[in-house]
Amino acid sequence: MKADSRIYTLVLKIGGGAMLDGGPIIEGRVISRERLCELVDACVTVQSYVDRLLIVVGGPGAHLFIGVARERGASEAECDELGVSVSEMASKLIVFALRRHLVELYPRAVQSLEEAEVALCTHRVVVVGPLQNGTTSSDSVAAFVAEHFRADALFIVKRWGLADRVPTTETPGSVLKSVKLKQLMSIVSELPERAGNRPILDFNCLRIVQRSHFRSFIVDFEEFRRSAGCLIGPADIRGVEIVNDLASVWSLADSQKNAVLWKAKRLMSELSDPFHDWRHVERCMCQGETLAKIYRYSDAEVVFLATALHDVERIHGEQDHEARGAEWAQNYLKQLGFQEALCTKVAGAIELHRWTMMPCGLEGKIVRDADKLDALSLDRWMTWDRLSSSGNALDFGVIEKIAGIARRLECLLSLQRSLSICATWKAELLKATSSFQSRELAHYGLIASSITNI
Ligand SMILES: [Fe+2]
Ligand SMILES: [Fe+2]
């Protein structure tokens, strides 16, 4: 089950109620040690399927503090501030509980998006403290973080499911249910809101879900605790998906795909570059498809189009072919009648595929990783060896450059799964070099397959 399914960036919102044992606050039984241990175990399981995990925590028992404060005459704004203080304590508590189990956890709860960005440069798992000033809930903070970091998915873990509060639709053959975002927004907008007691989900959270493109799921705490791994793995998520009515969904017809392939192949054939021929594109497409399947919330159609077209502008020169290719692809796909949003996404995935650049979106990272991994492709090295042994002069200046990139590939790749593919391919290339006819090529093969410590 663990095999080949990952999320690149996941935001996990844990409702404060998940830490409570239900005991009355005045008896000091707010935080349950048992619940906390269960949460830690579930977070440790989830992070093993995720490249980057951001955890946002609600305030356990905040409504109890707020209830007492309200009785003593505190204003709603003051009650909200109190709720934020409880969330802050809870986020620190989660860090203390998690850091003994997770070496990849940033060792403090970050206080700003800027700090979270820095933390993610060195650590895969980051707990985000309350960023809000009291006017928004931790649900909307989680959605805001998901939007900022272009998360593939947002999981909101609650002690209660949505199913008993809003009408949900069963998905045939799946345990996942769904609710339409518009319907949820209309229900939420009718419900009263008070500090510490927001109806179902904060309206701000829903607004962010509406304008963004990440997938959003409400997961019941019991499901999260029992089967955290199933949330990410191929088994369906047991929860409710909030279906964004405004999100673009496309499935391309075979004829559309064939038209793009034919065009890309024809353009690449105009290029007399043995290092960037149609086979290079085919291998990138194949590797892109593999990565898109693994990163389950990536857009496979975008990856298909972007890998097919990523190098076509090489026909007008290597310099800036990425930016020119992005512009060309956007216009070309538009002419073919593809949706504007799809054309923009494909262009974005092509624009920064150079090894010195870093695309923001997941599809761009997939295209770039697939392209860079090709420096280690055994098919490529074997072809060069065959060409060399049949008397063709190889440009060893270019091969030296490619070998140099391959040697440092561990530092250049974006996705965790690409790193394991890189390790396997280096081992295969190393083995193959002993059978190379060309001694010079074997020398560069050894350089390419050497391992960089990161
Ligand atoms: Fe390129
Ligand atoms: Fe390429």
Image (cartoon, rainbow, N blue to C red):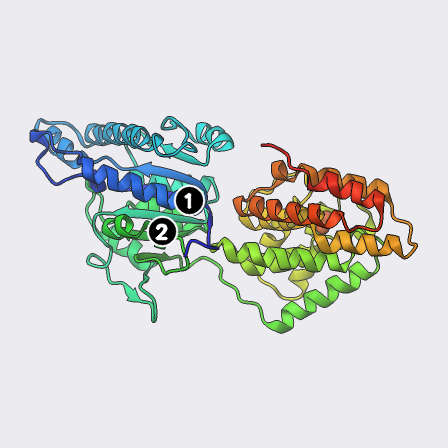
Q: What label does residue 229 carry, if any?
A: 2
State the image coordinates of residue 52 (x, y, percent, origin top left).
46, 40
Location of residue 80 (image quadrant): top left
Q: Is residue 300 above or below residue 97?
A: below
Residue that appears at 55% across and 59% down: 300
Q: Is residue 140 above or below residue 185?
A: above
Residue that appears at 78% across and 41% down: 444
Q: Residues within 10 Å of mark 2 (few under 14, many from 20)?
A: many
Residue that appears at 46% across and 32% down: 123
**CA–CA distance between discs 1 and 2?**
9 Å
Residue on which the image places disc 1: 48
Residue that appears at 17% across and 29% down: 75
Q: Residues within 10 Å of mark 1 (few under 14, many from 20)?
A: some
Q: Nearer the viewer, residue 292 or 11?
A: 292
State the image coordinates of residue 2 (x, y, percent, origin top left).
42, 53
In the rendered structure, are the residues bearing label 1 and label 2 in contact, judged by CB atoms less than 8 Å apart?
Answer: yes
Q: What label does residue 283 carry, if any?
A: none
Secondary structure at numbered mark 2: helix
Of labels 1 and 2, earlier in sequence is 1
Q: Is residue 95 left or right of residue 153?
A: left
Q: Amino acid at mark 2?
A: Gly
Secondary structure at numbered mark 1: loop
